[in-house]
Amino acid sequence: MSIKTIFVTGGAGYIGSHTCIELLQANYNVIVYDNLANSKLESLRRVEQITGKSITFIKGDIRDKDALKNAMTGCDAVIHFAGLKAVGESVEKPLLYYDNNVLGSLCLFHVMQELLIKNIVFSSSATMYGDPEFLPLTEVHRCEATNPYGETKLAIEMMLRALYNSDKDWQIALLRYFNPVGAHESGLIGEDPSGIPNNLMPFITQVAVGKRKQLAVFGNDYQTPDGTGVRDYIHVVDLAKGHLKALEALGRFECDAINLGTGKGYSVLELVGAFEQASGQSIPYIIQDRRPGDISECYADPRKAKDLLGWEAELSLNKMCVDSWRWQKHNPDGY
């Protein structure tokens, strides 16, 4: 069966909206299903503006089976982004995360099975690796999430593996992201967190644009070159292209977990310095205590993505910073 119509859960969000651009430019029909809990419909209007193509939008919750069934009928494949994603909030509200992410995914997979839609690309996370035993992280590293958010991603991966083992007609890709940053080069869409940002780059850009007084750096006593945490930052456009590659490669591999990262780690202060250089803005910061659940270093071995998907990250740290600043400068209050 040729795949023509893609059902994108959480498609109005940061990574989802950038992926919709890649799908539309590759001539897929796109149906976005989103409850807009942490996203804005304006993002999809701008996706249509960038691509000159239309998206079908349906507002709904993935825990609503009847709404899902009506929305998904006639689709060929699913890209599943929908989910709550703040590590700190997941520690404070674990049941909310299990209910939304795990129960919601269970409802989605039930409806997919009922409608015989057996192609799915799942938005997973490197968070599930926990504290690395070795670096760079390969997909065979043991999974031991250090927070409920990571645990929910691991539980969903386990569900999908069980589904595949029960029925090999399922075609599944489990994409484990590292740290998405950046924005579309048009400056029209980007990361627009609600409230205080949980991720580093939007916090930096909000300081640069004057929305926040200073950056909080959580911990400077890690065993890293400058004492701050090291992460693998990947441009969101590279990440979006990885989803397109995974969709087009479904069926060429088993139910595989695949890292999407650059293979290079940068510390918090290195990212701050790169942003200052790219934007010409000064980013004042203060050092605070480590956050619960944070780890010292985390970066990918991305070779499997290249071997299975023919994908590798192409955009530089400078490009990530330039595009993030363009988005924030032109959209100081987000959407």
Image: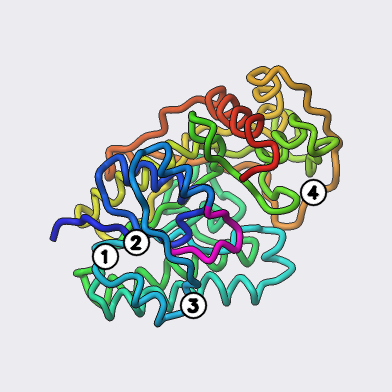
Between residues 153 and 332, which one lies in front from this camera angle?
332
Front label number (1 vs 4) = 1
* Disc 4: which residue: 290
Q: Distance of mark 1 from mark 4, alpha carbons? A: 45 Å
Whether 89 is drawn above or below 253: the answer is below
Cβ–Cβ below 8 Å for labels 3 and 1? no
Picture coordinates of residue 316, whole percent (x, y): 50, 25
Snapshot colouring: rainbow
Between residues 47 and 11, which one lies in front from this camera angle?
47
Q: Which mark is residue 7?
A: 2
Judged left or right of residue 284, residue 172 is: left
Residue type at mark 2: give it. Phe
Q: Which mark is residue 222?
A: none
Answer with mark 2 or mark 3, whichever residue precedes in sequence: 2
SS of the residue at dot 1?
A: loop
Q: Which residue is found at the position 35% from the left and 39% from the top?
A: 52
SS of the residue at dot 2?
A: strand
Q: Which residues are magenta?
A: 33-41
Q: Can I make out residue 145 in this image?
A: no
In this figure, what is the number of numbered marks?
A: 4
Q: Distance of mark 3 from mark 1, alpha carbons? A: 18 Å
Q: Which residue is found at the position 49% from the left and 77% from the top?
A: 63
Q: Can I make out residue 43 in this image?
A: yes
* Disc 3: which residue: 63
Residue type at mark 1: give it. Cys
- Residue 309 highlighted magenta (yes or no): no
Picture coordinates of residue 201, whole percent (x, y): 65, 37
Q: Distance of mark 1 from mark 2, alpha carbons? A: 6 Å
Using the rendered view, name the quadrant where residue 27 is placed: top left
